[in-house]
Amino acid sequence: MSSPAASVPASDGLDRKVFRDFFALAIGWWRGASARRAWFLTLALGACLVVNVGINFAVNTWNRRFFDALENSDSHTVFWAVIAFLGLVFCAAAIGVGIVLSRETLQVRWREWLIGSLLDRWIGGQRYYRMGLARTEPANPEYRIADDTRMATEPIVDFAIGLVTSVVSALTFVGVLWMVGGSLTLHIGSTDLVIPGYMVLAAIVYGVCVSGLMLWIGRKLPGAVARRNEGEAKLRFELTRLRENAESVALIRGEADERRALGATYADLVTRWLGVVRRHGHITWLTNSNGVFIPVLPLLLAAPKYLSGEFTLGQVTQLAGAFMQVQVAIAWLVDNFRALAQCYASMQRVTELTNAIDDIDGDFDRLHTGGVVLAPSGSGTLRLDELTIADRTGRVLIAGINARVEPGEKVVVAGESGTGKSTLVRAMAGLWPWGTGVIALPAGGTVAFVPERAYLPAGTLRGALLYPAQSAAVDDAVLSEALTEAGLGYLAGRLDEIDRWDQTLSNGERQRLAVARLIVQKPDLVILDGATSALDEAGEARLMATLAAVLDGSTLVSVGLRPGLDALHDRKLVLTRGPRGARLESVPLRTRPVTH
């Protein structure tokens, strides 16, 4: 779970760059390997929408004939109109099913592709770690990937449906307004003013005015929604953090402080919600007024010609229906502005994450130009050549060190706190780019880095032992023996039990399990950074002795061990603080046997 510290303040208006960046990412579903499925679903949905507009046009035409038949008391036409209407109902239901299936399948598949793409970018190249290290990670990336992708893609499909339907409907029903409505003659004194296609003109003018007014009234809503979503994510993060640290909080009786902190977070969220509510209220003035006025407006426009006998009742009904269809098309923005604001806020959060990913790639590429270089060592040795490690500000932590660890050698790295021992390990793992020089790791060999807090994936104990090669086929006897050697023999009967092992096991048990994993996997190079710090001194000594014996042919670099364990190693590399960064000194501990 990431910290919500880094976030970009949401602006009130709509930024075209957000739309451009989001669609540059999301349009990839219609390209490459997923293109065939994407285009099939898109075209199927589009065809269903066009047919649906055709059915609406047929219903509009049916209205005219039915009401004209009622006005003329033509029972024969009314009877057949009812029969035809049943057919229209069936067609409308069938095409509705087609729209639902194609629409929701498209939404699910598009989001599936988008989440997969984001996960590849976020996890790939260790960016999830690098952004945290550089403190450039946007708040709550997991929420952006899991929830904002849904809240961004689903409305876009609905908007596209509404927009396509609106355009096709407008083109279809504008013709009805023009042909059936005709022109309106106004008698102004002795002058007759003829307005051709007056129903079309009225629909366009009214729709454009209402849409423009909606944009002006609701211009601050997207920013308010984005700030509310940030507040929701922050609250969820703090609740999860409390649950994951429940024992620590309970032991120090920190409930009152946690409650105050959560209360302040929720109070801030309420303020953000009320900001959205106020802006919804402003919009509702327009949407509700528009909803009441629109059904009446075409009747008022058609009334003069109906009263003069130029229109039949069926024509008035047909014109009212056509006017509504055109008005819905033109006022599409009015009806969808709230959903558009929510969608925009989620698109903004997704693009913030992708931009941060792109930026961290650029930063690390720049830093690696002349920075710390990881290189293969063909001789199987671990080498540090003129290695200087700095912090993010450029301050030198370790200055110009050289070291060589031979294959199978056991080395302990020592030094005062703050001399850069853990930073050196991160650099060996390729996670720390700041500095200069070369770190050469054994080429073709397996390397295992074990930190102080051992990671245990959710699932079975077997999977935790084999991680990250969880699908590897290893005999149960080998796994049980490894657990026993690591002091966890009592867990041997629970290999296929599914549990949250990172919460079920104590700190010391988690570290023992990480060592058991090394015993099973037998990597060529093992780098331990405080990997046994949670154990008592005697337990740590026994576990390290077991590990050194089992991995006799492996190279071992240990950081953070108690001084009493020096005897298990061949050599000590001591970092000593200096005015221009720590220096490295090699101290022999025992003579290694000569191998032939």
Image: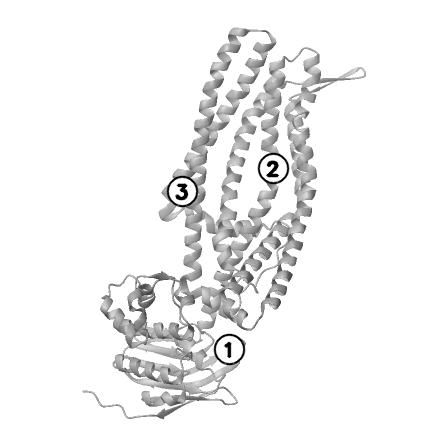
**Element type where label 1 sits in the image:** loop
Toward the viewer: 462 or 553? Answer: 462
Residue beneath the point at 48% across and 58% down = 142
Residue 153 coordinates in the image, percent (x, y): 49, 46
Tag on residue 369? none
Looking at numbered disc 2 in the image, what kind of residue is underneath it?
Answer: Asp
Q: Is residue 294 above or below residue 136?
A: above
Q: Amino acid at mark 1?
A: Asp
> What element does badge 2 sit on?
helix
Q: Residue furthest right?
A: 189
Residue 199 is left or right of residue 186, and the answer is left
Using the numbered discs, state the Cα–Cα distance from disc 1 to disc 2 in whole angstroms: 53 Å
* Residue bearing the label numbered 2: 335
Q: Residues within 10 Å of mark 2 (few under 14, many from 20)?
A: some
Q: Give the residue number, with chain letter if any, for mark 3.
A: 38
- Looking at the picture, how far across and down is residue 447, in whole percent? 32, 74
Horizontal side of 374 relative to 474 (left or right) equals: right
Residue drawn at 54 percent across, 28 percent down: 169
Provide the secondary structure element on which disc 3 rests: helix
Provide residue 418's location: percent of width, then percent of height.
50, 83
Of the residues under marks 1 and 3, which one precedes in the sequence?
3
The C terminus: image quadrant: bottom left
Which residue appears farthest toward the left when viewing the image?
Answer: 596
Q: Nearer the viewer, mark 2 or mark 3?
A: 2
Disc 1 marks which residue? 391
Q: Give the side of residue 180 with respect to residue 550, left or right.
A: right
Looking at marks 2 and 3 on the same chain, the residue that comes earlier in the sequence is marked by 3
Q: Residues within 10 Å of mark 1 (few under 14, many from 20)?
A: some
Three-letter amino acid code at the position of disc 3: Ala
Label total for image? 3
